[in-house]
Image (tube, grey):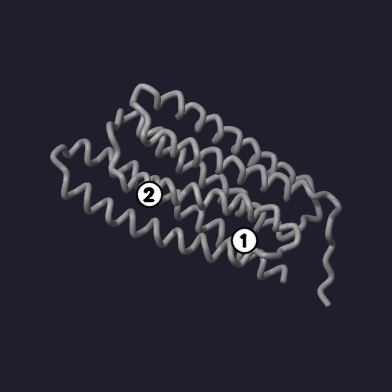
Amino acid sequence: MRLKLTPRDTVFFDLLTESAQHLVVGANLLRDLIPAERSARKAIFQRINEAEHQADEVTHAIMRRLNQTFVTPFDRDDIYMLASGLDDCIDFMEEAADLIVLYKVGELPPRVTDQVEVLQRAAELTAAAMPRLRGMKDLAEYWVEINRLENQADKSYRKLLVQLFEDASDVIQLMKLREVVERLENAADAFERVANIVETIALKES
């Protein structure tokens, strides 16, 4: 039988859950930003930026806790990777929103909304999964669904790139839009990496 030294302190689970909740806030705000008038986007972006800063603070709190804690609920390297992975998710969403505002992008193609809706769903699933790390139960459906969503995001991304090049009459505008959709694709990839880390942790702890 494997002997586990399980600390009473549950702060890591609480912090990881809090970090994932910021992803939901960021994804929902990003969804609001896409159809918004150009004049309204800056204010929405500032709220996304605030969510990203709050997520950074949680990540820093996790890192500090790792340095202060001898016994962790699971492998400290996995905690580090999971915290960093969650932070990557909101970083890419924030970058996409920032580019939309900085580049003064006009109306975005409908498939961009499809990309963001995938991110919203991935954020919700991730936020729901983090508390379940306490018992390492009922997590398989989470990483399977995230993988499916990432495949869906890949297809949307490829179709969107084709559409951008087919419809391109302005090369500069094409370059701007391509950067935005690439950041959104990076965010989808980041959510999948988080799910893969969770799967690895669950397998180690089973």
Where 89 sits versus 46, above or below?
A: below
Measured from the top left, where is residue 90 in percent x and y? 51, 42
Q: Quadrant of residue 76?
A: bottom right
Q: Secondary structure at mark 1?
A: helix
- Residue for badge 1: 198
Front residue (pair 80, 119)? 119
Q: Secondary structure at mark 2?
A: helix
Question: Which disc is residue 114 wearing?
Answer: 2
Front residue (pair 66, 47)? 47
Q: Quadrant of residue 15?
A: top right
Q: Quadrant of residue 63?
A: top right
Left/right of residue 161 with respect to residue 70 in the rendered view: left
Q: Amino acid at mark 2?
A: Asp
Front residue (pair 60, 17)? 17
Measured from the top left, where is residue 58 in percent x and y? 65, 39
- Say which residue appears at 50% left-offset and 51% top-offset: 121
Measured from the top left, where is residue 196 in percent x and y? 55, 62
In the picture as drawn, the residue positioned furthest to the bottom comes out as 1
- Say which residue appears at 56% left-offset and 44% top-offset: 87
